[in-house]
Amino acid sequence: MSWVALATLSALASAGAAVAQKRTLFRLGALELSFLLALAVLALSLYVPLTADVLALTPRAFAVLAAKSVVGGVAFLLVMVALERNPISGALPLMGLTPAVTGVLATVMLRDALRPGEWAGLALMTAGAWALEAKPRAGALRPLAEVFASGRYRPMLGAVLLFALSSVGDKLLVGDMGVPPGVVLFHQHVVYAAVFGVLLLARRVPPAALVRGAREQWPLLLAIAALTLAYRFLQLQATREGPVALVLAVKRTSIVWASLLGGRLFAEERLARRVLAALVIVAAGFLFLAHQ
């Protein structure tokens, strides 16, 4: 199967997981959901040690895997926090800003000049972000202030930065180092569970509350875990076969499907405008990456 097909399937599974996550966040907190999902996905991944030697990694591979898993875990938690606080059709489209954020950081830190096509993509992404919070009779710059300066979407913007770093680690592991995707996923969720567990201990969350949440939400938790395992495995397989930037661009079409389906399911306001904004941001991502 081609990397485009794999990335597209990953996008569809990711959209389904995001909608189910938003539904579950009405009953569970972001950290509690993140921990229970890590445990559920880890449980579904227990076949990996039975079919592969999960310890047959070089010290360098273990180091990269641990670092990228910690970064990815924090990014995932930030996404859950953003979904908990905001409409799914308002928060998720911001994930599509990753190519622009990466390009701007490279320009500032590495002095890599943006090409004309990349500037065009950056302008389109800015327009898409503006459309997310555009309202009648609001000031021209108010929508951008709502997105970038108000703090409402700060967790999602932080996740964008961290996911970009995590994706580079994925490419290094499955591409350059040849680590099987299943092994990466297994270790990744061990680290996720450990990170979220430490945070729960720091917040002194009673174990009884976690048990009660798991008992009440187990059907959705299992469904999200299965979809999460599917989309991450498919993304890793696609990353092995294709360019990591383009794989991420195709995978990010999930925000359009999740915004549309989730927005309709939860009766969110200004849905048509926000789905259009998501389409613009995703299209701009392809334009941006086409010049890299």
Image (spheres, helix red, strand yellow):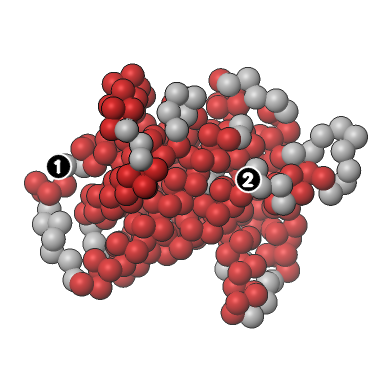
Left or right of 128 in this view: 74: left
Mark found first going from the N terminus, 2 or 1: 1
Towards the viewer: 62 or 30: 30
Quadrant in the rendering for residue 208: top left
For residue 63, say whether it is visible: yes
The image shows residue 83 at horizontal and vertical percentages of: 54, 36
The residue labelled by disc 2 is 153
Name the amino acid, label 2.
Answer: Tyr
Name the amino acid, label 1.
Answer: Tyr
Left or right of 188 in this view: 105: right
Towards the viewer: 69 or 231: 69
The image shows residue 65 at horizontal and vertical percentages of: 29, 62
Using the image, determine if residue 136 lies above or below residue 193: above
The residue labelled by disc 1 is 47
Using the image, determine if residue 127 lies above or below residue 245: above
Quadrant into which the C terminus falls: bottom right
Towards the viewer: 212 or 282: 212
Q: Residue at x 46, y 63 (%)?
A: 165
The image shows residue 46 at horizontal and vertical percentages of: 16, 42
Quadrant in the rendering for residue 112: bottom right
Q: Residue at x 66, y 47 (%)?
A: 151
For residue 2, say whether it is visible: no
Left or right of 175 in this view: 117: right
